[in-house]
């Protein structure tokens, strides 16, 4: 139902913000049709890394190649090839809409997405949401699978989904990763972010990101120095 996946390669990829590095020195090789699990605590730069790999965040250093196209020079091609299912707060589903409304919105805004494609995508991920349900009332597993299905219906070369295990009971972890494995077996490469490393599976590439403190002590002012010397 989808086109072939694209490989994703990074060498020394880094993003720096006003308070210092968000992530830096990332090297990875994800084969076409592979599954990346970038794991780390909040503040480790997982979401920013996924957005950078998708061409939605500019690198400060290093290089990324997606399907033979190098960022940032060929960012337009990469953005067209990579669908972002979830990467809060930049990309989320509107909680106050009903399932049928977010599906209708996707048909209007994403070229080529049809009702038939959406049904196929829901079958791949293993979800059958009721159209009348509000998105905000879905349980964490249903919300994740719906977001993945909407992105999969775009038939991308790669699909990004962050916070895979956030809010999930431990018993649901394996079933969600199995759903993402079905997604990548249907064609696209899957780039996922999570708190914990999933169980090993063929084709899984893992990347551990360390916690980075966003707190930076301000420079000492002249008054502060005088008080300290007093």
Image (cartoon, rainbow, N blue to C red):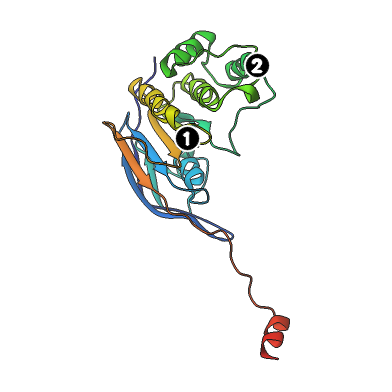
Tell me the mark number nearer the camera, choosing from 2 and 1: 1
Residue picked out by circle 2: 101
Nearest the eye: 218 or 80: 218
* Disc 2 to disc 1, C-alpha distance: 25 Å
Of callouts 2 and 1, which one flags the residue occurring earlier in the amino acid sequence?
Answer: 2
Q: Please, what secondary structure does the residue beneath circle 1 have?
A: loop
Nearest the eye: 73 or 50: 50
Relative horizontal placement of residue 39, taking residue 89 as reference (left or right): left
Q: Please, what secondary structure does the residue beneath circle 2 have?
A: helix
Q: Residue at x 38, y 38 (%)?
A: 37
Q: Residue at x 59, y 11 (%)?
A: 130
Name the image quarter holding the C terminus. bottom right
Q: Quadrant of residue 126?
A: top left
For the view shown, which residue lies furthest in the top direction? 116
Relative horizontal placement of residue 100, taking residue 22 as reference (left or right): right
Mark number displayed over residue 165: 1
**Within-10-Å neighbours for mark 2: few <14, some 14–19, many 20+:** some
Is 105 situated above or below 7?
above
Q: Residue at x 51, y 16 (%)?
A: 112
Is 21 situated above or below 98?
below
For the view shown, which residue lies furthest in the right direction? 223
Q: Are marks 2 and 1 in contact (CB under 8 Å)?
A: no
Residue 17 locus on image (x, y percent)? 56, 57
Residue 203 locus on image (x, y percent)? 28, 32
Relative horizontal placement of residue 170, taking residue 207 as reference (left or right): right
**Within-10-Å neighbours for mark 1: few <14, some 14–19, many 20+:** many
Nearest the eye: 206 or 68: 206
Residue 6 locus on image (x, y percent)? 35, 31
Relative horizontal placement of residue 47, taking residue 25 as reference (left or right): right
For the view shown, which residue lies furthest in the bottom direction? 230
Mark number displayed over residue 184: none
Name the image quarter holding the N terminus. top left
């Amino acid at each position: 139902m989808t086109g072939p996946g694209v490989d994703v390669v990074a060498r020394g990829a880094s993003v720096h913000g006003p308070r210092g590095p968000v992530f830096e020195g990332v090297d990875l090789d994800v084969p076409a049709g592979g599954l990346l699990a970038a794991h780390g605590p909040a503040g480790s730069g997982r979401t920013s890394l996924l957005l950078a790999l998708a061409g939605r965040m500019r690198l400060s250093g290093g290089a990324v190649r997606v399907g033979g196209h190098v960022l940032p020079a060929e960012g337009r091609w990469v953005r067209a090839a990579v669908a972002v299912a979830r990467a809060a707060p930049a990309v989320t589903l509107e909680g106050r809409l009903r399932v049928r409304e977010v599906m209708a919105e996707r048909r209007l805004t994403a070229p080529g997405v049809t009702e038939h494609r959406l049904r196929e995508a829901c079958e791949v991920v293993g979800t059958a949401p009721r159209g009348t349900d509000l998105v905000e009332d879905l349980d964490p597993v249903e919300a994740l699978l719906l977001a993945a299905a909407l992105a999969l219906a775009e038939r991308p070369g790669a699909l990004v989904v962050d916070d895979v295990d956030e809010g999930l009971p431990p018993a649901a972890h394996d079933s969600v990763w199995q759903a993402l494995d079905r997604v990548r077996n249907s064609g696209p490469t899957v780039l996922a972010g999570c708190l914990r490393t999933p169980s090993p599976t063929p084709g899984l590439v893992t990347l551990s990101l360390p916690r980075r403190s966003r707190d930076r002590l301000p420079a000492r002012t002249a008054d502060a120095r005088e008080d300290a010397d007093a």
